[in-house]
Amino acid sequence: MSVELPLGDGRVTVFLPDCDVTVRRPPGGETVDPGAAARDAVADPHGPRLARRVDPDDTVAVVVTDVTRATPDDVLLDVLLAELRRAGVVREQVSVVVGLGLHRPMDDDEIAAALGEHADLAENHDPDATVEVGTVDGVPITVHETVAAADRVVSTGMVEPHQYAGFSGGAKTAVVGAGGESQIGYTHGPDLLGRDGVRLGRVADNPFREFLDRAGDAVGVDFVLNVTHAPGGILGASAGDPRAVVRDLADTARAALAVEIEDEYDAVVAGVGAPKDANLYQTSRAATYVALGAHDPLRPGGRVVIPAALPEGAGEGTGERRFHEWLSTAGSADALYREMSEGYEGGAQRAFVVARVLQEYDVYVTDSQRPEVVEACLMHARESVREAVEPGSDVLVVPDALNTLLV
């Protein structure tokens, strides 16, 4: 049996003739036109319409997602700006902040591709240009100065499985995407990440998600317009109160993305593809989603195999550089996990959870442009998936690992 997996913007064919191969894809769902779904969501939101929440002389900051999310932000901005015009808020009163968190800045071409005719409104988030707007559990909440200065705060977002928040989206785009080191470091630190309930696919009783929601109140996130997706495209949109929007779209996503797994496997081959496989920081999500999700399908001593292009190596943002530094200077996964349990800077959390996986399993990255980066980060590089899988293995292939919930 041969299986096609994503690799960058293309595909790679995987053939494992000496192995027992099981391929599991999520059921998916009926896709929708993003623009039409967004317009319907804004017209019938959770809570009052956006046009009723703003005054004609208000300034509005819209926080959008960055290149690591496949959100149709240009379409969502079209809808949001049209709704603001209903209230008398003109384009010149609107600012757009690209929610980078600690990721690298987007260049002009990337912003133009993501935002289309609205690119001229946008500026990249700078975590050093933040203003404190409140505290949650004693943690200072800081946000980009443009967002802090606005009369109203709106955001877009993609509600998709997230290692810590259960699902992304909601207040997270503004709180983390346009936030400073304070809350990013706390939310991604060992204390919060080690708490019960912080897990992939879980929204209710998740301390990480609860902190984000309360921080969103401090930031003043008034209204969000989010979408969710499956491999085939956008499945739905929801707008209004951030908490309700996440619950709404998480239910839609679970129905489309959950796959029941009963057996154990020697290896899981996990597909990623663009934009996530641009760097090792994002690609490593496949390993942690598999091993640290609701159901771990690996036998003791198993391995995760991930085809990934990695044109950016480990990644170019602050968080990506910290991730690379921790992994590339560690003597072992056990030593790294112990050291990081004492604390680390924001962005390095991905090294912490990767170390947790590497304590039990090997991770192989294949077909990449930067094998030396993979080898430096306690993982193994191979030219192909076939070279990374032992003959005779029981293999589970998950073609879209970041959009599949193993349960």
Image (cartoon, rainbow, N blue to C red):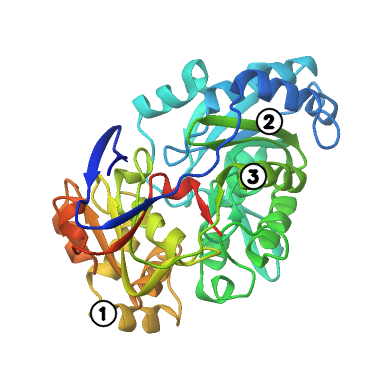
Pick whichever, 317 or 207, lies toward us. Answer: 207
Which mark's residue is nearer the viewer, 1 or 2?
Answer: 1
- Find numbered disc 2 in the image and state the secondary structure of the residue it sits on: strand
Q: Write the residue at 71% across / 34% down.
A: 238
For marks 3 and 1, give the CA distance: 39 Å
- Residue 106 vs residue 115: left or right? left
Mark identifier at residue 263: none
- Find numbered disc 3 in the image and state the secondary structure of the residue it sits on: helix
Which mark's residue is nearer the viewer, 3 or 1?
Answer: 3
Residue to which mark 2 is pinned: 60
- Residue 357 vs residue 369: left or right? right
Q: Position of residue 46 (x, y in %)?
A: 81, 37
Q: Position of residue 213 (x, y in %)?
A: 71, 55
Which mark's residue is nearer the viewer, 3 or 2?
Answer: 3
Q: Label 1 near label 3: C-beta < 8 Å?
A: no
Residue to which mark 3 is pinned: 255
Mark 1 vs 2, N-terminal side: 2
Around disc 3, counting alpha carbons within 10 Å, would you say few (fewer than 14), some (14 to 19), or many (20 or more)?
A: some
Pick whichever, 244 or 82, lies toward us. Answer: 244
Amino acid at dot 1: Ser
Q: Position of residue 338 (x, y in %)?
A: 39, 84
Amino acid at dot 3: Ala
Mark 3 vs 2, N-terminal side: 2
Using the rendered image of the protein, determine whether residue 151 is visible from the camera's viewpoint: no
Pick whichever, 180 or 402, lies toward us. Answer: 402
Q: Label 2 near label 3: C-beta < 8 Å?
A: no
Residue to which mark 1 is pinned: 332
Mark 3 vs 1, N-terminal side: 3
Amino acid at dot 2: Val
User: Which corner quadrant of the image does residue 286 belong to?
Assistant: bottom left
Q: Write the residue at 35% across / 78% down.
A: 359
